[in-house]
Image: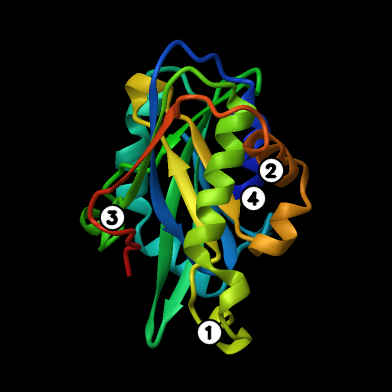
């Protein structure tokens, strides 16, 4: 079992979901470098950094400090039959400030089946400041095409091709975390930008390029800038 954000919230998982009508994806900045997962059962809290369990150190201490709130916030998941809950995010350090930027909550039943949703809990000090930004709306489209357009929009906004290495390596967002509301299936997709040039050579990039050369059809995708893409810390 993996707790890496881009694996748990991958395009592959999204593509397997049913689609019954129009859908709106909301974006948050994907920040930080290390993946961190808080894995909770009714009797324990475990901490994983980049899929390796840690039992001491700054990550563990931070989670331990918030243990009571963590248990309180996931209690409803257990009441609804979950056997395990994972809160998955990124470890973020800005100056002297360190903490978790949470993105995803995954509930597992006793058989190991999972359901995911974007993080809306209130555990950490800045959770009330989680802010969405870009929205993209889609009508009736194939999930693979939607995933490709979300990737393309991420590449355009993150601009890896346009920025020097010292900017990219010092706190610049690495991608976007896209999600839908619970009434639209609580879909989640974490995408790390690779640069527009590299993306154009991928399967999804080539598919978009080929689609642009076909006969023009009415657009089924609308983009809205709501409040500007924002992180938390």
Q: CA distance from mark 3 to mark 1?
A: 23 Å
In terms of sequence position, does the residue under pointer 3 or pointer 1 come before the other?
A: 3
Nearest to the observer: residue 219 or residue 133: 219
Task: Give the labeled residue for mark 4.
Answer: 4
Disc 2 and disc 4: Cα gap in Å?
A: 30 Å
Q: Earlier in the sequence, mark 3 or mark 4?
A: 4
**Extreme residue toward the front, this view:** 215
- Toward which corner of the image does residue 222 lie, by quadrant? top left
Task: Classify residue 112 as left or right of residue 130.
Answer: right
Q: Secondary structure at mark 3?
A: loop
Query: What is the crowding at mark 4: few (fewer than 14 residues within 10 Å), some, or many (at least 20)?
Result: many
Between marks 2 and 3, how big is the CA–CA gap? 34 Å
Residue 178 in percent (x, y) is at 46, 43
**Circle number at residue 209:** 2
Q: Which mark is residue 167?
A: 1
Q: Are marks 3 and 4 in contact (CB under 8 Å)?
A: no
Q: Position of residue 121 (x, y in %)?
A: 30, 43
Q: What is the C-alpha distance between the residues marked 1 and 4?
A: 24 Å
Identify the residue at horizontal 42%, vertical 28% (top origin). 186
- Classify 218 as above or below 91: above
Task: Report which residue position mark 3 lands on.
Answer: 130
């Amino acid at each position: 079992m993996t707790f890496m954000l881009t694996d748990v919230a991958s395009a592959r998982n999204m593509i397997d979901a049913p689609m019954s009508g129009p859908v709106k994806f909301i974006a948050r900045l994907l920040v930080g470098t290390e993946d961190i997962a808080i894995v909770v059962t009714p009797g324990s809290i475990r901490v994983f950094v980049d899929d390796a369990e840690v039992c001491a150190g700054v990550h563990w201490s931070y989670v331990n400090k918030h243990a009571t709130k963590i248990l309180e916030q996931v209690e409803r998941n257990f009441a609804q039959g979950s056997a395990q809950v994972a809160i998955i995010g990124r470890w973020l350090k800005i100056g002297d400030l360190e903490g978790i930027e949470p993105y995803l909550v995954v509930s597992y039943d006793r058989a190991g089946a999972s359901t995911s949703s974007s993080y809306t809990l209130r555990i950490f000090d800045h959770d009330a400041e989680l802010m969405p930004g870009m929205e993209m709306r889609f009508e009736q489209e194939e999930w693979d095409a939607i995933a490709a357009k979300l990737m393309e929009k991420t590449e355009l906004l993150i601009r890896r091709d346009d920025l020097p290495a010292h900017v990219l390596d010092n706190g610049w967002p690495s991608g976007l975390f896209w999600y839908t509301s619970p009434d639209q299936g609580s879909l989640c997709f974490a995408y790390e930008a690779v640069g527009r040039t590299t993306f154009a050579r991928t399967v999804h990039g080539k598919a978009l390029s080929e689609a642009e050369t076909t006969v023009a059809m009415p657009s089924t995708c609308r983009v809205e800038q709501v409040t500007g893409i924002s992180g938390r810390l």
